[in-house]
């Protein structure tokens, strides 16, 4: 029997057991190491990264590399593709990823084919001759869901690489490597670290040759995490499954209440996870007013922390115009659900 994520989140990435050995890995602050070992220098390896990477590998499978941010992890994947390589990606997703893909497409660095990832036939038709299928599912912030098993199988049949941004679903919901994907990416900043106190990213990779190429990319681009950030993220991972389930239970309750609210016109929720996107009966200004009226829910960007927070996504210029102006993305935290609901109700009453 394989170990459940609730357990491996707690047991993984610990130092070897020996009398008086520490239970937790130390934070290793060192830019260099005494000569003669396999690591040698602080940009090539660090014990605090290794502990975090071991824990993420237990959750996602494969071998993991940690990066200075989620965007650094995504950038590493695109960096190893040849000039002009065809990439198939969703036409809606995390604004940073979208901006990067648009930039790579505009400069000819990559040839990006944007598709509707909810349309499996359209995606399968687009991947012919592609080097990489990059999937984010559910998408940020519209929470569109791709048929991952079908798309991964179709790509694998044609030996096309598949990378999945698993930030929203997390390994509590899906483990894309087990479906045949080559790379799983996380903005560790979000649910894995979970306390809104660290920016960090990761790639978990099934193939050891691909792992080596991405490790080289991290080494040469210098997109390495700080040891303290890696340690904080691992500390967060200890409670990740418990936090995720608590936040998800809150989200499910809030979805049923939001659906019945007279001032809410549409609720987007994939049926799992702790992010809800909903549209209000009003315009951009009204949605801003709702976000500004909260007393418990923090008005801020980001997601996946223990604290509930929300924002109107289109307040960012980089957000896709296909995202409705009056859409509010709510990251549900671990507070008592009735307290969160009371705050949502009083904020909606400002309309
Ligand atoms: C936040 C986020 C990213 C980027 O991660 P950073 O840690 O902010 O660099 C990528 N993908 C998704 C889905 C995200 O939510």
Image: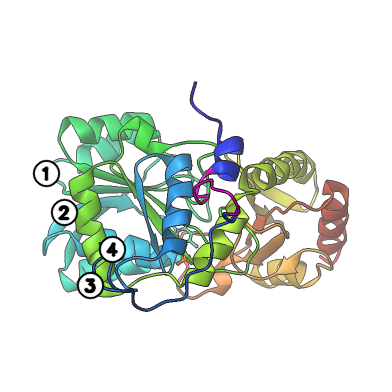
Q: Residue 76 has which mark?
A: 4
Q: Earlier in the sequence, mark 4 or mark 3?
A: 4
- Per the model, the C-alpha gap separating discs 4 and 3 is 10 Å
- Per the model, the C-alpha gap separating discs 3 and 2 is 24 Å
Residue that badge 2 annotates: 86
Q: Is residue 119 visible?
A: no
Specify few, some or many for label 4: CA neighbours under 10 Å numbering under 14, 14-19, or 20 or more: many
The reply to whether the C-beta atoms of the residues labelled 3 and 2 are less than 8 Å apart is no
Q: Residue 129 has which mark?
A: 1
Q: Is residue 347 left or right of residue 229?
A: right
Q: Is mark 2 within 8 Å of ligand 1?
A: no
Q: Check the image and report above or below for 28 versus 64.
A: below
Horizontal and vertical percent position of residue 236 = 61, 56
Residue that badge 3 annotates: 220
Q: Earlier in the sequence, mark 4 or mark 1?
A: 4
| Mark 3 secondary-structure assignment | helix
| Mark 4 secondary-structure assignment | helix
Q: Quadrant of residue 296?
A: bottom right
- Tally the marks: 4
The reply to whether the C-beta atoms of the residues labelled 4 and 1 are less than 8 Å apart is no
Residue that lies at the very extreme toward the top in this rendered image: 1
Q: Nearer the viewer, mark 4 or mark 3?
A: 3
The reply to whether the C-beta atoms of the residues labelled 2 and 1 are less than 8 Å apart is yes
User: For this rendering, which residue is in front, 329 or 178?
Assistant: 178
Q: In the rendered image, which quarter contains the C terminus?
A: bottom right
Specify few, some or many for label 3: CA neighbours under 10 Å numbering under 14, 14-19, or 20 or more: few
Q: Check the image and report above or below for 258 versus 197.
A: above
Residues shaded magenta: 12-20
């Amino acid at each position: 029997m394989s170990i459940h994520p609730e357990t491996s989140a707690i047991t993984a990435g610990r130092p070897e057991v020996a009398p008086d050995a520490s239970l937790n890995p130390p934070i290793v602050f060192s830019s260099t190491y005494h000569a003669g070992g396999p690591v040698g220098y602080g940009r090539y390896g660090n014990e605090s990264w290794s502990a975090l990477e071991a824990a993420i590998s237990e959750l996602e499978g494969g071998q993991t590399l940690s990066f200075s941010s989620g965007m650094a992890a995504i950038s590493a994947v695109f960096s190893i593709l040849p000039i002009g390589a065809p990439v198939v990606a969703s036409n809606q997703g995390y604004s940073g990823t979208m901006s990067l893909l648009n930039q790579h497409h505009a400069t000819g660095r990559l040839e990006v084919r944007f598709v509707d990832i909810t349309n499996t036939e359209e995606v399968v038709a687009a991947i012919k001759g592609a080097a990489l299928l990059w999937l984010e599912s559910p998408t940020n912030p519209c929470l569109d869901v791709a048929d991952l098993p079908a798309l991964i199988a179709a790509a694998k049949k044609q030996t096309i690489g598949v990378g999945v941004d698993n930030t929203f679903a997390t390994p509590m919901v899906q483990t894309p490597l087990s479906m045949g994907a080559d790379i799983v990416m996380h903005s560790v900043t979000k649910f894995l670290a979970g306390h809104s106190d660290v920016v960090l990213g990761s790639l978990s990779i099934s193939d050891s040759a691909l792992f080596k190429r991405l490790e080289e990319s991290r080494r040469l681009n210098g997109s390495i995490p700080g040891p303290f950030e890696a340690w904080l993220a691992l500390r967060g991972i200890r409670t990740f499954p418990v936090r995720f389930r608590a936040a998800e239970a809150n989200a499910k309750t809030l979805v049923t209440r939001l659906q019945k609210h007279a001032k809410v016109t549409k609720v987007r929720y994939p049926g799992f996870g702790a992010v809800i996107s909903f549209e209000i009966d009003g315009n951009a200004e009204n949605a801003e007013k709702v976000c500004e009226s909260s007393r418990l829910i923090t008005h801020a960007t980001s997601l996946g922390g223990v604290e509930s927070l929300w924002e109107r996504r289109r307040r960012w210029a980089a957000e896709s115009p296909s995202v409705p102006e009056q859409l509010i993305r709510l990251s549900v935290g671990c507070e008592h659900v009735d307290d969160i609901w009371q705050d949502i109700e009083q904020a909606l009453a400002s309309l």
